[in-house]
Image: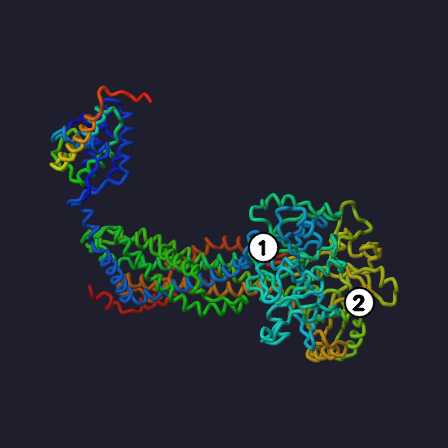
């Protein structure tokens, strides 16, 4: 398998899973992203991404306990896997390197 | 869960939708998330917005979610070995077929009869439909036709003036090519060297014949042939007759001289491939239209002698062209009658041509009969399919246990539906194969009746695809209800032996009712068609058609007509001879150049005319109602005396007595009415008797003789006519016909249709009865115990038979009540095509009813009696 690439939204979801630490399930992730970015997120989009990440081995999931808040339905809690962490840090490293190369302060081009 | 949470509930149908949409294991977590969010939305944004968001989010789950891999139930199913499953379905289906041989035979047999009928009719219709579609440009070829208003009635005329075609081509840019065709009925026989042949179809046409249409030349230049007035093109068949079979090897025959009967010498400039069977234009000889342009008296705007075909450009707006053409004729002639032009598509000519005045010719079919056959085919197929459904559901109980076991082991309903559908389709496939055997029986019969040469086009991919589609459709039609019905059983109930069949019972009964209703319609149809035919053939025509011969005189014999007549009159076997200009079967010379003494302004009559001699009325046995016959001794009788028929007198508002002595003007001749003759039929029964006038102008042309033979002198008369004919003419073949045979020939299409419908209704009844027989057998089996108990308690055989039959008779009676009005209406409509028709009388329905009831009773009582005379000990012994 070649190198894995993540889309922007996938990265966002993966990061959210990482920081929610054991509280990462569909609705929570959706609300978190909505609050942070201020954009409208569709639940199914989150689910699709979560399943895809799981398929790629970046997250793992367990079906968690029952809460009354969800009308008795169980939730599937996602946690980031070691491979997920590696990928995230690789992405971050690339970004960091790029930022280093940019002259400060950053100004729009005058051309 | 506390009350608070229940205060706001998302719409439940969205939840159902989610549940339907999502795999089971994903549904729970998704719905949990949705509910959690919902509560949140309600608190933040209110219920309405929350509902809306809930809906929006739910429906976006329509996208496929990536499958979760581990431990999913769905995956277990998709790993199951489907091919083994299907093999098992087929095996079980096959075992069932074998185990219940009688049912299977009835089921498959009925279906294959129905299919064979359907395929036969399908082939027939396809054959009719194919006509003229072999031309590459058939979509862009139209025939210019006229609509004339004469004496207030609209007449369709298929022929148009000769100069129309060239004029259309110069006036309209969208008309690329034109082609005129006319029938050279005057041409008679052709002679080359010693050989004289009288071809069947001689046409006059333009060079464009080979550009507009797809007719091909074997020899000759398609760009040049027929451009010269004295050129001729012959068909391959005629070339073989003229120049022997191997004319191709015999060297170039182009340039040979061919002599027409009138002495004109023609140069052979081309040999054409025989026109395809599916061409309404058939020809043996093509003459050049150039000759007509130069020499013919009929080549003028006032004379309609040609069929004008136009080839329009691919992008032409045909509707607009039609509109422009409508009043085109006015530009060129002063019209006496309102006449408009229109366009008829080439592909519509064969089936949709119904023109007046004999202006249309060529091979013709009839859309009415195509429709009748279509209806009959559908009816038979429906009957066969209903049979199939009925027997399959009736036998459901024997399969119920199997369904129960399958379900208990874990079969899904979907899978059972597939199972039963595949069983139905394998039976249909067997039926289709059988139907091909039956086709070998049906097709020759149909070919003989309809005069076609149909064969099953196994190699035609279109046919194969159509057949596959048809098989699939029939399997679905026949299999879907039994599949749904059988698969709905509740395994717990079925395995316990609990049976409830009420709904299927009703469904089955309604199918039996519709089957018999359809059969009743077919039977009444057959009876009425036959009655109408008999009526037309036996109706008093107003003259005596028995032993009456019409001898057609070729052009060169006409001036000798009076000599031939006196020769014939001397013979002892002949009762009378009369000269005539028409054949009494279909007389079509008519005109509106006719006025009368008391004519109110604006009134006009289209009058048919016949030129006869004084012997005509006695020879044909017509009666004078008033006045006198023509008399050769009175000189004015041969110039200005007329005899009219009763309806003519009535239309001029005279009584028959008043009419005598009245002045009328026919063409430019003024004369007196000297007699009124009874109304007699001189056209097919589809048209009403119209005004007619006899004149006695010996100098005017006559076309034939009527010869009345004495009752036992028919043979002698014919040989006498042949001898006389030989004395005066050697070239042309003698053309004589019995008037009653000519009349019969006229109704040949109707007769053929009647025969076909008759055969098909027999088949329909057979199939219905097969089904009924199957049902009766089933009922007998199911009620064995009941009958046993009844017998023990003292019921007689008659009682049981009655009990048994009455169930079925009830259904047949209901179907009879339903279908009679439908049949009455349909037949009433058909009969309206005829000016003279029978009425659909009540007794026809009684006959049909009795017939159907008898057949039903016979079918059912076999089983009923068998059940009734069985020893009750046997049926009650084993529990």
Same-subunit check for callouts 1 and 2: yes
Chain to which the residue tagged by mark 2 belongs: B
Where does residue A72 sit, x and y in percent of width and height?
Answer: 15, 33
The quadrant of the rendering that contains the N terminus of chain B is top left
In the rendered structure, which disc, 1 or 2, sits on the residue that comes first in sequence?
1
Where does residue B552 sit, x and y in percent of width and height?
Answer: 72, 70
Note whether B413 is above or below B681 in the view shown: above
Residue located at (14% from left, 28% from top): A19
Kindly indicate the quadrant of the structure image that contains residue B420.
bottom left
Where does residue B217 sit, x and y in percent of width and height?
Answer: 59, 64
How many numbered dots are placed on residues in this image?
2
Of the pair B331 and B750, the residue shown nearer to us: B331
The quadrant of the rendering that contains the C terminus of chain B is bottom left
In the rendered image, is residue A70 in sight? no
B672 left or right, relative to B808: right
Q: Residue furthest top?
A: A105
Which residue position is annotated with label 1?
Answer: B346
Kindly indicate the quadrant of the structure image that contains residue B655.
bottom right
Rendered image coloring scheme: rainbow
Instruction: Give the Cα distance between marks 1 and 2.
Output: 43 Å
Residue located at (57% from left, 54% from top): B348
In the rendered image, is residue B81 in sight? yes
Which residue position is annotated with label 2?
Answer: B613
Note whether B382 is above or below B858 in the view shown: above
Note whether B127 is above or below A43 in the view shown: below
Circle 1 SS class: helix
B29 left or right, relative to B170: left
Circle 2 SS class: loop
């Amino acid at each position: 398998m070649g190198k894995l690439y993540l889309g922007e939204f996938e990265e966002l979801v993966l990061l959210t899973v990482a920081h929610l630490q054991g509280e990462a399930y569909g609705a929570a992730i959706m609300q978190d992203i909505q609050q942070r970015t201020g954009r409208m997120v569709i639940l199914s989009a989150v689910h699709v991404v979560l399943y895809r990440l799981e398929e790629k081995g970046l997250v793992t999931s367990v079906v968690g306990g029952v809460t009354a808040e969800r009308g008795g339905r169980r939730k599937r809690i996602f946690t980031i896997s070691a491979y997920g962490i590696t990928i995230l840090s690789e992405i971050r490293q690339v970004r960091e390197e790029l930022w280093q190369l940019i002259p400060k302060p950053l100004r729009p081009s005058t051309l | 869960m506390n009350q608070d949470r229940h205060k706001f509930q998302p719409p439940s149908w969205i939840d159902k939708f989610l549940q339907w949409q999502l795999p089971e294991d994903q549904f729970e977590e998704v719905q949990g998330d949705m509910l959690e969010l919902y509560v949140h939305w309600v608190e933040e944004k209110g219920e309405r917005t929350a509902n809306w968001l809930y809906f929006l989010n739910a429906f976006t789950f329509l996208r496929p979610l990536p499958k979760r891999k581990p431990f999913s139930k769905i995956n277990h199913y998709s790993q199951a070995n489907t091919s083994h499953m299907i093999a098992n379905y087929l095996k079980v289906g096959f075992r069932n077929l074998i185990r219940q041989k009688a049912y299977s035979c009835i089921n498959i047999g009925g279906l294959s009869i129905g299919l064979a009928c359907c395929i036969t009719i399908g082939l027939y219709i396809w054959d009719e439909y194919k006509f003229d579609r072999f031309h590459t440009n058939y979509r862009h070829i139209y025939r210019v036709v006229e609509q004339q208003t004469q004496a207030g009635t609209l007449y369709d005329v298929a022929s148009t003036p000769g100069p129309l075609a060239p004029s259309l081509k110069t006036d309209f840019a969208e008309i690329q090519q034109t082609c005129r065709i006319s029938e050279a009925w005057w041409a008679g026989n052709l002679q080359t060297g010693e050989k004289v042949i009288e071809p069947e179809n001689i046409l006059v046409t333009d060079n464009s014949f080979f550009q507009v249409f797809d007719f091909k030349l074997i020899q000759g230049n398609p760009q040049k042939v027929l451009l010269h007035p004295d050129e001729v093109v012959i068909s391959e068949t005629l070339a073989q007759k003229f120049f022997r079979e191997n004319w191709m090897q015999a060297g170039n025959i182009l340039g040979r001289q061919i002599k027409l009967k009138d002495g004109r010498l023609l140069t052979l400039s081309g040999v054409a491939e025989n026109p395809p069977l599916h061409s309404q234009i058939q020809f043996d000889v093509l003459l050049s239209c150039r000759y007509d342009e130069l020499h013919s008296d009929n080549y003028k705007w006032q004379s309609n002698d040609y069929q004008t075909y136009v080839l329009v450009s691919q992008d032409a707006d045909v509707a607009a062209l039609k509109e422009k053409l409508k009043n085109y004729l006015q530009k060129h002639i002063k019209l006496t009658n309102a006449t408009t032009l229109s366009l008829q598509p080439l592909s519509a000519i064969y089936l949709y041509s119904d023109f007046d005045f004999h202006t249309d010719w060529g091979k013709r079919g009839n859309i009415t009969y195509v429709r009748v056959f279509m209806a009959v085919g559908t009816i038979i197929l429906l009957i066969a399919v209903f049979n199939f459904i009925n027997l399959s559901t009736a036998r459901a109980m024997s399969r119920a246990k199997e369904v129960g076991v399958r379900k208990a082991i874990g079969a899904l309903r979907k899978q059972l539906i597939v199972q039963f559908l595949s069983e139905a389709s394998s039976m249909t496939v067997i039926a289709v194969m059988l139907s091909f055997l039956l086709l070998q029986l049906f097709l020759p019969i149909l070919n003989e009746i309809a005069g076609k040469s149909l064969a099953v086009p196994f190699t035609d991919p279109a046919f194969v695809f159509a057949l596959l589609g048809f098989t699939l459709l029939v399997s679905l039609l026949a299999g879907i209800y039994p599949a749904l019905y059988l698969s709905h059983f509740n395994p717990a109930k079925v395995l316990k032996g609990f049976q409830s069949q009420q709904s299927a019972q009703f469904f089955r009964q309604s199918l039996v009712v519709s089957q018999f209703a359809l059969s009743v319609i077919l039977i009444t149809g057959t009876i009425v068609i036959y009655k109408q035919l008999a009526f037309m053939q036996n109706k008093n025509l107003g003259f005596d058609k028995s032993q009456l011969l019409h001898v057609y005189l070729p052009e060169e014999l006409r001036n000798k007509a009076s000599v031939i007549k006196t020769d014939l009159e001397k013979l002892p076997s002949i009762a009378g001879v009369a000269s005539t200009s028409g054949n009494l079967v279909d007389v079509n010379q008519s005109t509106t150049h006719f006025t009368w003494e008391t004519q109110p302004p604006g009134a006009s009559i289209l009058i048919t005319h016949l030129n006869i001699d004084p012997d005509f009325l006695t020879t044909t046995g017509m009666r004078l109602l008033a006045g006198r016959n023509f008399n050769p001794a009175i000189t004015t009788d041969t110039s200005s005396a007329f005899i009219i028929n009763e309806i003519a007198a009535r239309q001029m508002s005279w009584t028959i007595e008043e009419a005598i002595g009245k002045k009328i003007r026919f063409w430019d001749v003024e004369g007196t009415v000297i007699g009124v003759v009874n109304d007699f039929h001189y056209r097919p029964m589809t048209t009403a008797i119209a005004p007619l006038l006899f004149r006695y102008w010996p100098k005017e042309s006559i076309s034939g003789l009527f010869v009345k033979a004495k009752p036992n002198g028919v043979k002698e008369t014919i040989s006498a006519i042949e001898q006389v004919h030989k004395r005066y003419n050697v070239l042309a073949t003698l053309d004589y016909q019995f008037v009653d045979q000519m009349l019969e020939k006229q109704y040949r299409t109707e007769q053929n249709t009647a025969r076909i419908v008759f055969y098909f209704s027999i088949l329909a009844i057979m199939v219905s009865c097969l089904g009924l027989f199957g049902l009766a057998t089933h009922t007998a089996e199911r009620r064995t115990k009941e009958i046993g108990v009844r017998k023990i308690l003292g019921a007689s055989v008659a009682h049981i038979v009655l009990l048994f039959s009455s169930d079925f008779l009830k259904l047949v009676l209901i179907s009879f009540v339903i279908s009679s009005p439908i049949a009455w209406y349909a037949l009433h409509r058909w009969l309206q095509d005829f000016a003279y028709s029978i009425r659909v009388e009540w007794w026809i329905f009684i006959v049909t009813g009795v017939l159907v009831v008898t057949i039903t009773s016979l079918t059912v009582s076999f089983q009923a009696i068998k059940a009734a005379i069985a020893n009750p000990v046997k049926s009650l012994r084993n529990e």
